[in-house]
């Protein structure tokens, strides 16, 4: 438990490399509980709070239809008379009360946030997944194959790294809008966002995986695999990949925070999620119009949600980086 | 040193050619240029004539070379949306963005270095701790939220500062400046803080960690032992040696400032190039997008080149083998 001697902790493998309980571990749960990463997690209040906030947000996004008081995108459930209700104050016309208020069209802010969170998290996760798969594969290829393959991949990565990712995402988004016929633009917007953010973010993964692969590929187990005649593809995916994944996990967490902010920024700029499928960024964009007339809650609550989400994912990433870094133990 | 510079210049040219290829492909293949130039009423002969006149029947390489040649002379074609030369539109908008970026850059650099040195020297002081915690929030806040927050605080609640536009500007013929009128200067305050805040926190944290690293070294201890004043030790000995990474990061962030100006300009409706670009993305105005891409890449590549050269020049250790990449 908490007073474990240091030597015991260091003997335990990190979470992602842990073997099933064929060793003399009492139980699988027990070994996870005592693992380095879990130990450091239990002793970092910041990480615990951040994880709780993140998990709550993810769960509320998944169960949004059941938690939300109304479906904000079902026109039948909206009543224009409810527009601009203050948070917690019964509406002057209808007497209905909304604990986070309503926007100009009488949509319940609490419900729009839940549905917006859904879009934001979906885009964030998918974009990171896309960047991760692309980056890890290209990184493995560059590191293992070497030669001109490596030169091309890493040159492209270097060039892309010179440009801020938000700019790259904007350009991809703009080009995609030009290619997609106008009647499909709104439907495709979410997927275009995912591809744009994902493509702007693969470089980090590729660089780290390439670096780790260069180290791993000269180790004995890889030579052994080569000797018994495994194909390069199998060596890369089955042998090297599992051993280069722990830094990838850290980057993925930090990337998630960046992707959520990037999505919100693009949507805020009016080139992201369409008003028919608003993300947190779109909600903030809408809310900005009412800031000057005093309806602060339309902007404030989505902004607060976005901030809490980005901050907790960021803190989780920071903690994970320190926890998985052997030099800091 | 010379060989290094030549090699870097060569690499930069290649990067620019590649970006040019991307810009040209956008220009040529996204949407049909003919469609955008001719209206609904057109004959097959019209299309064919225009196609020939624009050189769209030429081989790809020839078209690309022609595009590059025009781009070098500043000719990026006609905006689909505004029906005016793109170069003219950009020239009108550039002063706004450059002035904003300049003020933000100066702000980020001076305040960032100042606070970085302060928090490093007073490492455990309460003021330093507060600054560090606030900066953590500053890094996590998305730029547009900072902008909105400032607008709400100083524009809506306190009504001290203007929240959109450039205020009154003075037209110098080839340049419009907001530096010469009080409303122009006032209008600059909120956008430049918004734009510079992220870079400021970044520079501050960097200077702090570099300073802490340097202050631990023996030569600092020796300088103290020699009885030099704290000021001299901190600034002449320590700060000087933290400058190499600061120069690199600042240089690279200069490009980021120009790019993030897109967001700030949208929040504050600042009539600069960034706002122009966002509108171009919304309306798929490809010539404007292509021109913006080319201009910003030239800027980025130049900055990178200068930073790399400066890096070698500032740090003599890198000059010995000259093979630093």
Image: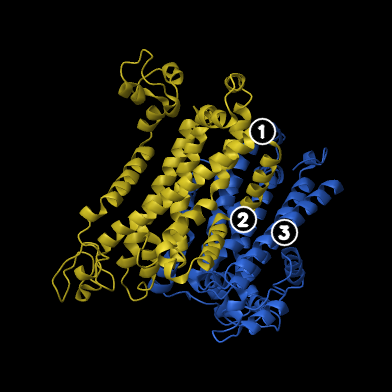
The spot of residue B253 in percent (x, y) is 62, 55
**Pointer 2: residues within 10 angstroms few (<14), some, or many (20+)?**
some
Please name the residue shown 53% across and 56% down the image. Answer: B198
**Pointer 1: residues within 10 angstroms few (<14), some, or many (20+)?**
few
Same chain letter for marks 3 and 2: no
Could you tell me how far apart the alpha carbons at marks 3 and 2 are, in whole angstroms? Answer: 12 Å
Q: Which mark is residue B217?
A: 1
Same chain letter for marks 3 and 1: yes
Q: Are marks 3 and 2 in contact (CB under 8 Å)?
A: no
**Foreground: B69 or B190?**
B69
What residue does disc 3 label? B16
Tell me if residue B51 can be seen: yes
Locate residue A303 relative to residue A211 in the image: left or right.
left
Could you tell me how far apart the alpha carbons at marks 3 and 1 are, in whole angstroms? Answer: 42 Å
Chain coloured yellow in the rendered structure: A
**Foreground: A152 or A92?**
A152
Could you tell me how far apart the alpha carbons at marks 2 and 1 are, in whole angstroms? Answer: 35 Å
Locate residue A4 relative to residue A93 in the image: left or right.
right
The spot of residue B241 in percent (x, y) is 70, 43
């Amino acid at each position: 438990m908490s007073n474990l001697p240091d030597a015991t902790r260091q003997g335990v493998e990190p979470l992602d490399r842990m073997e099933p309980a064929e060793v003399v571990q009492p139980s699988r749960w027990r070994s996870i509980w005592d693992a380095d990463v879990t130990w450091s997690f239990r002793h970092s209040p910041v990480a615990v709070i951040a994880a709780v906030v993140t998990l709550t947000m993810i769960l509320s996004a998944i169960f949004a239809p059941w938690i939300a008081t109304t479906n904000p995108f079902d026109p039948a459930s909206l009543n224009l008379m409810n527009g601009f209700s203050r948070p917690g104050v019964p509406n002057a016309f209808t007497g209905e009360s909304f604990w986070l208020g309503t926007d100009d069209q009488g949509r319940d802010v609490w419900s729009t946030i839940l549905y917006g969170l859904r879009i934001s998290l979906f885009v964030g996760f998918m974009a990171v997944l896309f960047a991760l798969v692309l980056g890890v594969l290209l990184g493995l290829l560059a590191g293992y194959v070497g030669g001109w393959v490596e030169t091309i991949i890493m040159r492209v990565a270097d060039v892309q790294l010179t440009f801020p990712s938000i700019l790259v995402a904007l350009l991809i988004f703009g080009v995609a809008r030009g290619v997609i016929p106008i009647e499909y633009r709104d439907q495709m917007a979410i997927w275009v966002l995912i591809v744009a953010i994902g493509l702007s973010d693969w470089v980090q993964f590729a660089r780290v995986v390439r670096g780790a692969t260069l180290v791993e590929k000269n180790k004995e187990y890889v030579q052994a695999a080569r000797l018994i005649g495994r194909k390069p593809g199998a060596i890369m995916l089955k042998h090297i990949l599992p051993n280069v994944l722990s830094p990838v996990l850290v980057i993925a967490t930090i990337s998630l925070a960046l992707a959520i902010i990037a999505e919100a920024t693009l949507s805020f700029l009016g080139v992201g999620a369409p008003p028919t499928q608003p993300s947190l960024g779109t909600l903030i964009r809408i809310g900005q119009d009412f800031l000057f007339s005093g309806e602060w809650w339309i902007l404030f609550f989505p902004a607060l949600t976005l901030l809490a989400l980005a901050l907790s994912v960021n803190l989780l990433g920071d903690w994970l980086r320190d926890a998985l870094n052997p030099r800091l133990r | 040193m010379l060989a290094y510079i030549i090699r870097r210049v060569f690499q930069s040219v290649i990067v620019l050619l590649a970006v040019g290829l991307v810009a040209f492909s956008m220009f040529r293949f996204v949407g049909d240029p003919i469609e955008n130039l001719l209206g609904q009423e057109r004959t097959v002969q019209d299309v064919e004539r225009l196609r020939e006149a624009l050189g769209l029947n030429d081989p790809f390489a020839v078209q690309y070379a022609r595009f590059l040649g025009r781009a070098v002379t500043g000719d990026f074609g006609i905006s689909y949306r505004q029906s005016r030369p793109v170069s003219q539109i950009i020239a009108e908008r550039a002063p706004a963005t450059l002035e904003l970026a300049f003020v933000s850059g100066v702000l980020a650099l001076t305040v960032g270095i100042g606070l970085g040195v302060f928090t490093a020297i007073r490492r455990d002081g309460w003021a330093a701790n507060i600054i560090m915690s606030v900066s953590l929030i500053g890094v996590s806040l998305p730029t547009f939220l900072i902008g909105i927050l400032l607008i709400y605080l100083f524009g809506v609640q306190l009504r001290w500062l203007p929240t959109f536009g450039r205020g009154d500007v003075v037209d110098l013929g080839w340049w419009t400046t907001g530096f010469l009128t009080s409303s122009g200067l006032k209008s600059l305050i909120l956008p430049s803080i918004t734009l510079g805040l992220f870079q400021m926190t970044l520079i501050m944290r960097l200077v702090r960690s570099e300073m802490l690293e340097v202050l631990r070294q023996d030569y600092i201890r020796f300088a103290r032992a020699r009885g030099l004043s704290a000021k001299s030790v901190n600034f002449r000995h320590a700060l000087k040696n933290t400058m190499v990474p600061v120069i690199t990061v600042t240089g690279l962030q200069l490009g980021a400032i120009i790019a993030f100006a897109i967001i700030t300009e949208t929040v504050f409706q600042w009539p600069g190039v960034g706002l122009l670009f966002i509108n171009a993305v919304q309306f798929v105005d490809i010539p404007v997008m292509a021109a913006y891409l080319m201009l910003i890449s030239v800027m980025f590549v130049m900055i990178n080149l200068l930073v790399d050269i400066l890096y070698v020049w500032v740090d003599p250790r890198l000059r010995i083998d000259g093979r630093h990449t």
